[in-house]
Image: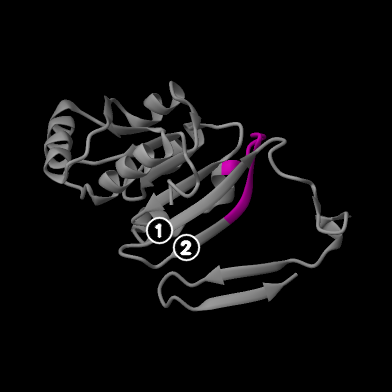
């Protein structure tokens, strides 16, 4: 997905004891797109465990040690961001991220965890920011993936198709029940 988006700057948060399959995939995607992959870990023990697991998988990338929320404030131009929804501060990490001028894809893995069940993308994007939610989707894969495409100011057109404003067109809303996987489609 990161390679398809042609992400030039991919950032991921990783917690000690977590799987590294996502990291290996992001490292490969970054190599193919000519981009950079950075993983944020909370301490030196996590860093050494992460690097050891990556070496076994045959991948390498840059690792930054620090609290993810603080580290995000020092990184600019993020195209693709992956956070773990099991972390208590994952919404603050998403808010603190400085996204690319062309927008970004934000991914929450383990989205069916207790912290993520009350999470809404609008809560991350509200508050006078220049970000706008273009599309979001929940995928019941593994422990759940919640994915959003976010545009920054000026990155998306304000008119659709035939020049009508979006407010005058009908709108379809799709809701996926996280427990059963049922899809509900509503027209507004």
The answer to if 122 sits in the magenta stretch is no
Out of 137 and 29, give the one closest to the viewer.
Answer: 29
Q: Residue at x 12, y 36 (%)?
A: 49
Q: Residue at x 49, y 37 (%)?
A: 79
Q: Which residues are magenta?
A: 125-135
Q: Is residue 173 above or below residue 108?
A: below
Out of 98 and 116, give the one closest to the viewer.
Answer: 98
Specify few, some or many for label 1: CA neighbours under 10 Å numbering under 14, 14-19, or 20 or more.
many
Q: Residue at x 63, y 42 (%)?
A: 151
State the image coordinates of residue 139 (x, y, percent, origin top left). 43, 65
State the image coordinates of residue 138 (x, y, percent, origin top left). 47, 62
Q: Quadrant of the C terminus?
A: bottom right
* Gap between marks 2 and 1 measured at Cα: 6 Å
Is 19 on the left or on the right of 73, as rendered? left
Quadrant hosting residue 14: top left
Q: Which residue is mark 1?
A: 145
Is 186 on the left or on the right of 147, as rendered? right
The residue tagged with tag 1: helix, strand or loop? strand
Is 24 on the left or on the right of 46, as rendered? right
The residue tagged with tag 2: helix, strand or loop? strand
Specify few, some or many for label 2: CA neighbours under 10 Å numbering under 14, 14-19, or 20 or more.
some
Q: Residue at x 42, y 78 (%)?
A: 180
Residue pushed farthest top?
74
Q: Is residue 181 above or below residue 63?
A: below
State the image coordinates of residue 187 (x, y, percent, origin top left). 72, 73
The answer to if 126 sits in the magenta stretch is yes
Q: Which residue is mark 2?
A: 138
Out of 35 and 180, give the one closest to the viewer.
Answer: 35
| Contact between labelled residues 1 and 2, with CB atoms less than 8 Å apart | yes
Is 96 on the left or on the right of 158, as rendered? left
């Amino acid at each position: 997905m990161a390679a398809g988006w042609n992400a030039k700057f991919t950032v991921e948060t990783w917690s000690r004891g977590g799987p590294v399959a996502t990291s290996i995939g992001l490292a490969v995607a970054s190599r193919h797109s000519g981009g950079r992959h950075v993983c944020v870990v909370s301490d030196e023990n996590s860093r050494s465990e992460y690097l050891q697991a990556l070496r076994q998988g045959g991948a390498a990338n840059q690792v930054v040690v620090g609290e993810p929320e603080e580290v995000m404030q020092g990184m600019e131009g993020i195209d693709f961001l992956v956070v773990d929804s099991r972390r208590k501060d994952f919404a603050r990490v998403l808010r603190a991220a400085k996204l690319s001028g062309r927008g970004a894809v934000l991914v929450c893995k383990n989205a069916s965890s207790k912290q993520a069940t009350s999470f809404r993308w609008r809560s991350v994007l509200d508050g006078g920011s220049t970000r706008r939610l273009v599309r979001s989707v929940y995928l019941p894969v593994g422990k759940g993936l919640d994915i959003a495409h976010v545009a920054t100011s000026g990155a998306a057109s304000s008119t659709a198709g035939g020049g009508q404003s979006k407010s005058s067109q009908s709108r379809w809303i799709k809701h996926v029940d996280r427990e059963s996987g049922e899809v509900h489609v509503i027209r507004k």
